[in-house]
Image (cartoon, rainbow, N blue to C red):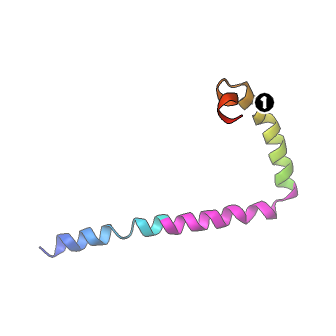
Amino acid sequence: MTPPPLHYIKTSPPPPRPSVVIDEPLVQTDHKPTPRISSEGLSKFCTISNQIIPLLLALPGFQSSQF
């Protein structure tokens, strides 16, 4: 009778903890690299956005949904 409840309790607490811990570092790492690669990142982002925006605009339904 004791082993099953112990296992159930052990398995339930871990899942929520890692998800919260993973979410926090991801947000921190996303904010850190952006300032580091300011000039290169901006230039690359501009070129990529210039290529992607027309493609998105060409797609039907994208103009009405976002714009």
Q: Is residue 65 above or below residue 37?
A: above
Residue drawn at the location 44% of the way across and 70% of the way down = 17
The answer to whether residue 6 is left or right of residue 19 is left
Check if residue 33 falls in the magenta segment: yes
Residue 9 position in % (x across, y down): 27, 71
Quadrant showing the C terminus: top right
Residue 38 position in % (x across, y down): 84, 59
Residue 54 sits in quarter:
top right
Residue linked to disc 1: 54
Residue 46 sits in quarter:
top right
Residue drawn at the location 50% of the way across and 67% of the way down = 20
Q: Secondary structure at mark 1?
A: helix
Q: Is residue 20 above or below residue 57?
A: below
Residue 28 position in % (x across, y down): 65, 67
Counting labels gives 1
Give, as a single range, the part of the protein colored magenta: 20-39
Amino acid at circle 1:
Pro
Residue drawn at the location 73% of the way across and 25% of the way down = 58
Quadrant showing the N terminus: bottom left
Residue 37 position in % (x across, y down): 81, 60
Q: Is residue 47 above or below residue 25?
A: above
Residue 31 sits in quarter:
bottom right
